[in-house]
Image: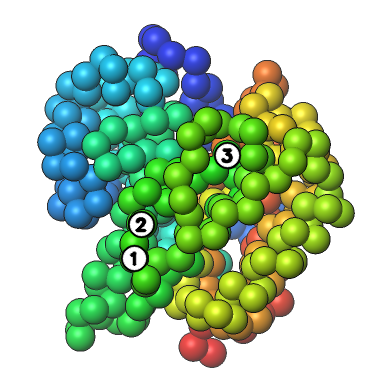
Amino acid sequence: MAPPPERGTFKFDKYQLVMQVLRDSGGPLTEHAPEPMPREWLEAVHDPEYVAQVFAAQVPREKERRIGFPVTPHIASRVRHTNGGTWLAAQLALHHGYAANSAAGSHHALHDTGAGYCVFNDLAVTANRLIAEGADSDAARDIRRVLIVDLDVHQGDGTASLMAGRDDVFTFSMHAEKNFPVRKARSTLDVPLADGLSDAAYLAKLAEHLPPLFDRFSPDIVLYQAGVDPHHDDRLGRLSLTDDGLAARDRFVVREARRRGVPVASALGGGYGTDQREVATRHAASMLAMAEENVRHPRPGS
């Protein structure tokens, strides 16, 4: 845990609470500590000048305002490790079917700046690197097509922008139409939702779009932005999902992937509220629901 910056409104303490809730759940849990994301992997997706600014903790003030907090040396180190966590989750998912990063999901970060509490875009960087290594004849697993499923309440505009024009990465975002960002990017498939949408209608929309997408695109892995901010009590959300609705959503994503033999790596994504333990409990419940669904399916290669 990096010390929180003195400026900015983002609540960093939920991440440690998520791990506490997971450990207290009694569920089977194996913890892994990621290596920091290599600089050249970040520079393959982000502007090298911006990467240098983050590494030196010298991000211009206007970019820090877009991010929502100052990039201190502690934060610079933290975001390299949280980005490395999504890469590690993808590697573990290839062996176990499912793995989770208990942080990251930084889907608003753009080519030359961060935004919306996001510094580097772990989803885009991981997708790019998976395919780059899959193109290597010596790679352990040939990953040619990556599906990014973004069910955060906010559109994954950074991911959409960074992966635009690629036919080997499919970006799917289902989000509250009137929520941040005001100016949306164009994902491969966007499904905007009306304010106040509840469990049944939300799950019907997901069932309408996700299974055909799997069958049409045939991904080798799913990177899943599992934000819990569609919850009806979320401070920044505009949707009305219950705890049961979020669990059904997460199980559905994993079920549709795993019954086709496709591994899933999830990232934490958004979740906001005045009671950080309540938010952390939602995130932990999301990961546990996905892990429980995963055990119902054979491991990749078995």
Callout in the foreground (1, 3): 1
Q: Are marks 2 and 3 in contact (CB under 8 Å)?
A: no
Question: Which residue lies most toward the top here?
Answer: 6
The correct choice, above or below, for 299 with respect to 103 in the image is below
Quadrant in the rendering for residue 3: top left
At 42% from the left edge and 21% from the top edge, which residue is drawn? Answer: 68
265 displayed left or right of 3? right
Q: Nearer the viewer, residue 237 or 281?
A: 237
- Using the rendered image of the protein, determine whether residue 31 is visible from the camera's viewpoint: no
Which disc is residue 154 wearing?
3
> Dot 1: what SS?
loop
- Write the residue at 39% across / 10% down: 7
Left or right of 141? Residue 29 is right
**223 to 113, vertically: above or below:** below
Residue that mark 1 sits on: 166
Q: Nearer the viewer, residue 214 or 87?
A: 214
Q: Residues within 10 Å of mark 2 (few under 14, many from 20)?
A: many
Q: Earlier in the sequence, mark 2 or mark 3?
A: 3
The type of residue carrying mark 3 is His
Q: Are discs 1 and 2 less than 8 Å apart at CB?
A: yes
SS of the residue under disc 2: loop
Near-viewer residue (25 or 102):
102
Q: CA distance from mark 1 to mark 3?
A: 22 Å
**Quarter that holds the C terminus:** bottom right
Q: Secondary structure at mark 3?
A: loop
Amino acid type of the residue tagged 2 in the rendering:
Met
Tell me what residue is drawn at x 59 percent, y 72 percent: 213
Q: How many neighbours does mark 1 have within 10 angstroms: few (below 14), some (14-19), or many (20 or more)?
A: few
**Residue 163: which numbered mark, if any?**
2
